[in-house]
Image (cartoon, rainbow, N blue to C red):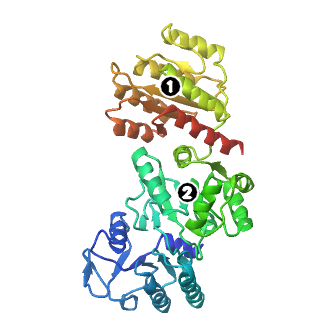
Amino acid sequence: MRSLDRLFHPAAVAIVGASERPGSSGGAVLSNMIASGYDGRILPVHPKAETVMGLRAYPSLAAVDGPVDLAVIVVRPDLINGVVEEAGQAGIRQILILPGGYSEAGDAGRAREAALRDIAARHDLCIAGPNCAGLIDARPGAPFAATFLRDLTPGGGVALISQSGAIAEEAICYANENGVPLGTVVSVGNGLQLGVAEYLDYLGGRDDVQAVLLYIESVADREAFERIARSIARRKPVVALIGGRTGAGAAAALRHTGARAFDAAEAAGFAARCGMIRVTSLREMMSAAMGFGFYPGGIGRRVLLVSNSGGPGVIATDRLIDEGLEMPPLPAGLAAELRQLLPAEAAVANPMDLLADAREDRFAATLSAVLSAPSSPYDAVLSLHVVPFMVDAAPVVERLADIAAGARLPVMHTMMGTLEQREDWFATLRGAGVPVFRDGEQMAQAAGLLARFRAE
C-alpha cells in the first residue's frame, strides 16, 4: 500500500524518454504531467538535451540530483530493462512502464519479461505496467498524470481501473463531455506486479474514492480478487464491465490480453460472488459513474417521476420498471395539494405530467410540495424537462437547483431537446448536487444501478 501511495502521489518524478515532440509518447507524458498541475519535481531524462519543455533535463537516472520516487519509462522496448536496472541501482523503487514488448510480444517478449521480473526481485521494485497508458489521479491538492492519453479527467470521487487503454480514453472523453465526476484512471496493461486486484485494494481503501469502475477481461487469481472485491463492495460501489462474454468476444479478449475471458454465465456468477454491480455496456458503466458520483450510498427502489412531456415520460417509466424500480401512487394529501397548484389538464399521478408549457413556477411548486411532504413513500425524485420553443429554460434550471440543493431526498434530472445553454444549465444543476442526463432512459438506468447497490 505504501508503494502504491508513492506511485499515485510521488514527490519527484523522472520521465525517461521525455521529449519536446508533442506527438511522441515522451512528449505526451511530460505535457500531461505539466497540464495536470502536479506540484512535485518533474525531471526529464534525455541523453542529449539540456532542457525539455523548459525543464532542466538529465542525461541519465544516475545523473539526477536528489531523491526520485517514481521513474516513468517511455523508451523503446529493447532499452527498457536497462533503464529499470539503472533505476534500481539509483534507489528508485516505483517504476511505471508504458511501452509494450513483453508477454504480449511472443517468445522474445516473454524472455524480456522474465528478465524484468528478475530485476524487480533483485532491487525490490514496484512496477506498474508494462504495456499500459499510465495513471491519472485528480485528487484535490495532489493532482498527478503520468499518461499519454489525450485528455485528463474532470475530477471527482469516481475511479476507473481498466484493462484497456482505449476504454479509459473513451471514459475520460465521456466524463468531460457529460460532467461525470471521474477523478482517477488506471490503465493496468500487462499487470506484471500490479493487476486489477491490487489497484482495487488500494483505491477502494482511499476515503476520497466514492466508487470504483472496472473494465476487465480476465483475472489471474480469481479467489484473491473475490476476497478483495467483497471487502471493498461492502463499503462502496464496485461496478464491473466484463468483456469477452460471447464466443467471438472471448477470442478477441484472448488476442488482446493473452488470457481466457469469462463467458456470460461465469461473468454473472463472478460479479455476484464479488458483490460487484455488473453492467454490460460502456454507456451503462458511465451511467453508474454519474449516479454514484453524486449518490455513492445508492438510493431506495421507490421513485417518483415528474415530467413535462408525455412520450419521454412514458419511455422513462417503462425503463424504470425494467430496472426493477417501484413507482408508488401519490399519497391522497399530496395529490390534493398538487391539483390545487397545477392546471386541470395536468396528470397528477406517478408519473406526473406537468404539460409542455410548464415554466419555473409549475416545476418549483411541484418539486417543493413533493420534497416537503411530511411522510413520503418515495426514496428519490426524478424530473424530466423537455424544453419547448416557448419556454425559457434558464429560470426553470435556477429554481430546480435552489430547491434541490437542500432536498432531503435524492434528486436526479434530465433535460432534452435543443439546449442552447446546455453546459451552463447542467453545471448549475450539478453544482446543486443533482446528476443531469440527456435522456430519461439513461436517468432511469442510473437510478436502477443506484437501487441495486442499496439492495445488495
Q: Residue at x 33, y 24 (%)?
A: 392
Q: Residue at x 65, y 17 (%)?
A: 331
Work out which quarter of the rendered image holds the N terminus and state it.
bottom right
Q: Earlier in the sequence, mark 2 or mark 1?
A: 2
417 shown above or below 366: below
**Image location (x, y in percent) of residue 334:** 60, 16
User: Residue beneath label 1, please?
Assistant: 312
Quarter assignment of residue 118: bottom right
Is residue 371 among the parts visible in the rendering? Answer: no
**Image location (x, y in percent) of residue 159:** 53, 57
Quarter assignment of residue 31: bottom left
Q: Nearer the viewer, residue 219 or 4?
A: 219
Q: Is residue 203 left or right of residue 61?
A: right
Q: Residue at x 60, y 70 (%)?
A: 258
Q: Nearer the viewer, residue 408 or 350?
A: 350
Is residue 79 among the parts visible in the rendering? Answer: yes
User: Residue beneath label 2, please?
Assistant: 209
Is label 2 in contact with label 1 (beta carbons under 8 Å)?
Answer: no
Instruction: Pick out the residue farthest to the top.
Output: 344
**Image location (x, y in percent) of residue 105:** 53, 77
| Mark 1: secondary structure | helix
Badge 2, how many Cα within 10 Å: few under 14, some, many 20+?
many
122 shown above or below 439: below
Q: Nearer the viewer, residue 332 or 177?
A: 177
